[in-house]
Image (cartoon, helix red, strand yellow):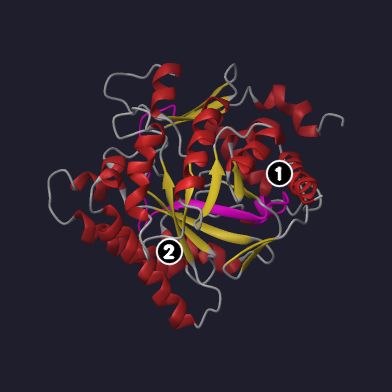
Amino acid sequence: MGRSAYEWLWPLVRLVPSELAHELGLLALRAPLRWGGAAVEDTFEWRGHRFRNRVGIAAGLDKNGVALRGLAALGAGFVELGTVLARPHPGNAVRPRMRRLLRERALWNRLGFPSQGAARVRDRIARAPLADVALAVNLAPHPLTVKSAEREPGFAGRARAELFEIARLLHPWAAFFVLNASSPNTPGLRRQLEGGGFAQEIVAPLRAELLRLDAEARRIAPTFLLVKLPPEDADGKALGPEGLARLVKPFLFADVCDGFVAINTSVALARAAVRVGEGEPTGGVSGAPLRALALEAMTVLAELAPDHLRIGVGGVMDAADASALAAAGAHLIELYTGLVYRGPRFVRDCASALKAARASQQK
């Protein structure tokens, strides 16, 4: 197969600062074009929701829903929007906030949840809803709420109120929600995830609220809730199989959540690859260096949570990486950094590989 137009343009793309290139890419995706060609049909169904194929766009690429239709036109089976916050937040002030690590085929970011707020995102989706592509919403407590947990009691109640507000605003369009308590760019967030009460005090009530909204809307297919997992603990130490098992087990009880997204970006990889100023956010790294950690996490999840929905993300830089994550136990695959490096055709390439692998297994 010949090189795509994007691959020919890549030497020019890489000259543009990463965050600016990201914004220009979203602007280009708003054009009414089918950037990735016709979608691969490889139907997957989960609790009444139908995905036209098993490849989706990961959270972080379109945080505010400005290019959802363009991302869907890449041929994705679903698009994960966000991270969405209850109210606007500018993200981390220190620049740069994104950088390509070309030698490692990776991205580094310390954006820190820049969000225009759930109300504005709601209005944007309402004007241009997706027709044949499932929408997921990635949501999180506001960074100021997380910061207040260090000095004020009542974090769980404030976080629940914010998450419920986002859920109520975006529920009419979402097939599922992903709770992001594993971002390395909001100080204290991963420590809250590790807290003993997080599953029962925040995640389970949010799932109950989604079911209440389903009943109120008389929705036949229930809205499900997933938890996004980190590759390491709050101090940046790799979890490993035993640490991941300890982190996941509180979420495996009935009525806590419906599945997991694994994994988020790595602080440890960022420390090894990028030098930051004293007191500045370290950020996280995605892309090829995350591949082994993502595969390990998915292998553990497939054993621990066989009845939960499992979405694999991290280190998918070619179609073989997507197939490897699926073989490790992922029902669905998400793309971000690989899409940045490979371009619009990458979604279709991965979807085709997953479909071919499944056909081969069924022979």
Q: Mark 1 points at which residue?
A: 347
**Relative to 100, residue 297 above or below:** below
Residue 184 showing in the rendered view: no
Mark 1 residue crowding within 10 angstroms, few (<14) / some (14–19) / many (20+):
many
Please provide percent x and percent y for residue 159.
27, 57
Which residue is tagged 2? 119
Residue 202 location (% of width, % of height): 29, 59
Which residue corresponds to the image point at 58% horizontal and 45% vertical from the top-left? 329
- Residue 317 in sight from this viewpoint: yes
Picture quadrant where residue 1 is located? top right
The first of marks 1 and 2 along the sequence is 2
83 vs 104, nearest the viewer:
104
- Taking the spot 12% from the left edge, 53% from the top edge, the residue there is 153
Residues rendered magenta in the picture:
69-97
Identify the amino acid type marked 2: Ala
Left of 86 or right of it: where is 151? left
